[in-house]
Image: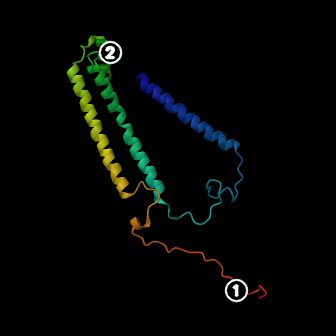
């Protein structure tokens, strides 16, 4: 069994053992006093009013989903930025040869892990610059697709928190006007 597998097994067993120990100790130590108040649904310290089966406002879900989508998609920028930066450093002929070889090794290491990068020949500057431009073009295409999706969501109105009623296709609610109470002329004034 390799060292990595042994470390993973020890880590999993230690994590499971700590989890089980906490659950068992909690079961033995905590008092068991059930009550109807403890069985109620907890809503941020507020007393639950009405049924739990109500129509949930989908705007919360849509905004959270959009955040997750764009946040995860932006995480894909990092590898391309590393490739672009390393390829640009490897193709920069003003840098020393050892810096260029380390940058090229960051993109694709030669030989076994831990081997010296000095054994490999220095990278071809033209090929490294071409790789940098390919990485830059790829990330621009990817970012363009994200912008098209963002523009579509913006045009649809999914990013607007308060939508106008006319865009929903629903008849607007009638406006309620509060009237001032009328006073009778001469009533109770002694005239």
Most foreground residue, 142 or 151: 151
Q: Quadrant of residue 169?
A: bottom left
Under tag 1, what secondary structure? loop
Whole-percent x, y for residue 49 in the image: 62, 64
The answer to whether residue 108 is seen in the rendering is no
Give above or below for 58 relative to 144: below
Mark seen at residue 109: none
Give above or below for 1 relative to 22: above
Whole-percent x, y for residue 121 in the image: 24, 13
Q: Quadrant of residue 108?
A: top left
| Quadrant location, the C terminus | bottom right
Whole-percent x, y for residue 9 in the image: 47, 29
Residue at 45% x, 25% y is 6
Which residue matches tag 2?
Answer: 99
Whole-percent x, y for residue 152 in the image: 33, 53
Most foreground residue, 121 or 52: 121
| Left or right for 75, reference 19 | left
Give the class, few, some or many, for how many residues have Cα within 10 Å of label 1's Cα (few <14, many ≥20): few
The answer to whether residue 13 is seen in the rendering is yes
Residue at 32% x, 26% y is 85
- Closer to the N terminus: mark 2 or mark 1? 2
Which residue matches tag 1?
Answer: 185
Give the class, few, some or many, for how many residues have Cα within 10 Å of label 2's Cα (few <14, many ≥20): some
| Left or right for 179, reference 64 | right
Under tag 2, what secondary structure? helix
Most foreground residue, 55 or 86: 86
Q: For the view shown, which residue lies furthest in the front direction?
A: 191
């Amino acid at each position: 069994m390799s060292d990595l597998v042994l470390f993973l097994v020890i880590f999993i067993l230690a994590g499971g053992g700590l989890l089980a120990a906490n659950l068992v100790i909690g079961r033995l130590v905590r008092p068991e006093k059930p009550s109807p108040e403890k069985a109620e649904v907890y809503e941020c310290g507020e007393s639950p009013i009405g049924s739990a089966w109500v129509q949930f406002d989908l705007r919360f879900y849509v905004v959270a989903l959009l955040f997750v989508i764009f946040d995860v998609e932006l995480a894909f920028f990092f590898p391309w930025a590393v490739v672009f930066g390393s390829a640009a450093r490897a193709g920069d002929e003003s840098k020393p040869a050892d810096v260029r070889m380390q940058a090229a090794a960051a993109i694709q290491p030669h030989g076994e892990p831990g081997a010296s990068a000095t054994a490999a020949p220095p990278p071809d500057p033209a090929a490294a610059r071409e790789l940098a431009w390919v990485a830059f073009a790829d990330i621009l295409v990817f970012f363009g697709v994200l912008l098209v999706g963002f523009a579509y969501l913006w045009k649809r109105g999914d990013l607007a928190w308060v939508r106008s009623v006319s865009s929903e296709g629903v008849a607007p609610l009638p406006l309620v006007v509060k009237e001032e109470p009328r006073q009778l002329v001469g009533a109770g004034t002694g005239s």
